[in-house]
Image (tube, helix red, strand yellow):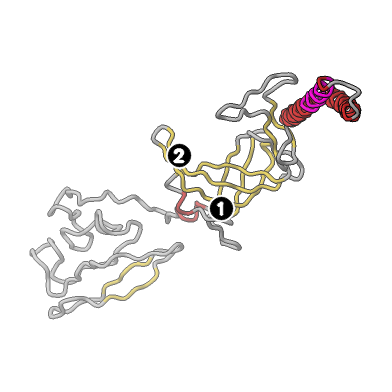
């Protein structure tokens, strides 16, 4: 650049010198003191100096253009980050040549603000229907197993991710990381709160598995008695022949509650004389009721011969 400017200054000086000689030659030629050839030579020298000046000026312009191109190239060697933050990863070294052809290479990975982080959670397709923006999120990391971190669902993305035939959807969780405990790349176990109840009554599981005293699990079918018809027990005390065993009907009643019955004159079911007497007490076919404290039992009233169903009265059995 300086050489081109010096050449321009030299050409200007030459042009000024030849111009003065040409003017002097014209004056002398007018008084016939010099020959015409000398005048022509002075004019040619002046024209040549002017042409050299223009050539030097063109060279100066080219030098200025080359200087500007060099400045542009120099500006490309200085890489500025588009955001302020913390450098997470550096992929190049000082002095390394970086060539960007069709794809710009990654030089640095920068975190904008570590105080505000996001958790990229993979939610299964069976549970993503209950996830909504703004729901509370609780998660843990292996670095701090005893500490619970909280966040908020910020976005549920629609693009599915399939890994080993398992479809999941990325859910973005916003987390406040002012204490800078969380770091990029940590593995988190996330729990999204889809519903919660406050001031709810809690019961021990044993309360739902209560069994009264003397309870036996039903067999599920009618057994065959030793005597009498199938499903009926042996003879009852008091003259009842094919009565049901105490404790309820087999396979259908509620064990632990006795049925109150007694035989009347003329014998009962299967008793002496055969058949049912007119004053025989009919066995109760109702189900036995019970509560958590004392069972309920049914005491049938003495039916008449014409009555089709005995009247029943409920009474509480002794505890």
Given residues 83 and 120, the one toward you in this image is: 83
- SS at mark 1 in the image: loop
Given residues 116 and 250, the one toward you in this image is: 116
Say whether residue 58 is left or right of residue 214.
right
| Residue at x 11% of width, y 68% of height | 276
Q: Main secondary structure of the magenta part?
A: helix
The range drawn in magenta is 38-51
Q: Quadrant of the C terminus?
A: bottom left
Does the stretch in magenta take in 42?
yes
Say whether residue 105 is left or right of residue 176.
left
Residue 46: where, in percent of width, then height? 82, 26
User: Residue 125's image quarter?
Assistant: top left
Residue 220: where, in percent of width, then height? 25, 50
Confirm whether residue 41 shows in the render: yes
Q: Is residue 241 above or below residue 284?
A: above
Given residues 8 and 280, the one toward you in this image is: 8
| Residue at x 70% of width, y 40% of height | 82
User: Residue 73's image quarter?
Assistant: top right
Say whether residue 279 is left or right of residue 32.
left
| Residue at x 37% of width, y 67% of height | 296
- The disc placed on residue 161 is 2
- SS at mark 2 in the image: strand
Residue 201: where, in percent of width, then height? 56, 61
Residue 77: where, in percent of width, then height? 73, 27
Q: Quadrant of the N terminus?
A: top right
User: Residue 313's image quarter?
Assistant: bottom left
Q: Residue furthest left?
A: 274
- The disc placed on residue 193 is 1
């Amino acid at each position: 650049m300086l050489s081109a400017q010096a050449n321009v200054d030299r050409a200007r000086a030459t042009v000024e010198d030849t111009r003065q000689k040409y003017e002097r030659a014209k004056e002398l030629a007018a008084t016939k003191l010099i020959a015409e050839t000398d005048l022509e030579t002075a004019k040619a020298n002046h024209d040549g100096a002017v042409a050299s000046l223009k050539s030097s000026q063109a060279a100066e312009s080219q030098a200025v253009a080359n200087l500007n191109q060099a400045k542009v190239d120099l500006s490309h060697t200085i890489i500025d980050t588009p955001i302020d933050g913390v450098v997470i990863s550096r992929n190049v070294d000082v002095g390394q040549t970086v060539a960007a052809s069709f794809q710009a290479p990654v030089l640095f990975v920068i975190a904008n603000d570590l105080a505000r982080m996001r958790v990229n959670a993979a939610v299964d397709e069976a549970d993503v229907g209950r996830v909504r923006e703004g729901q509370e999120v609780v998660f843990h990391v292996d670095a701090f197993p005893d500490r619970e971190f909280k966040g908020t669902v910020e976005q549920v993305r629609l693009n599915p991710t399939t890994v080993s035939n398992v479809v999941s959807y990325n859910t973005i969780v916003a987390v406040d990381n002012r204490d800078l405990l969380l770091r990029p790349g940590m593995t988190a176990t996330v729990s999204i709160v889809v519903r919660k109840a406050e001031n709810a009554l809690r019961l021990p599981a044993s309360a739902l598995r209560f069994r009264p005293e003397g309870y036996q699990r039903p067999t599920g079918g009618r057994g065959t008695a030793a005597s009498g018809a199938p499903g009926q027990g042996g003879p009852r005390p008091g003259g009842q022949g094919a009565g049901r065993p105490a404790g309820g009907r087999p396979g259908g009643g509620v064990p632990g509650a006795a049925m109150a019955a007694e035989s009347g004159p003329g014998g009962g079911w299967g008793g002496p004389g055969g058949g049912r007497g007119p004053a025989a007490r009919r066995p109760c076919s109702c189900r036995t009721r019970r509560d958590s404290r004392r069972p309920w039992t049914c005491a049938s009233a003495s039916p008449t011969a014409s009555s089709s169903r005995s009247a029943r009265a409920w009474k509480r059995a002794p505890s």
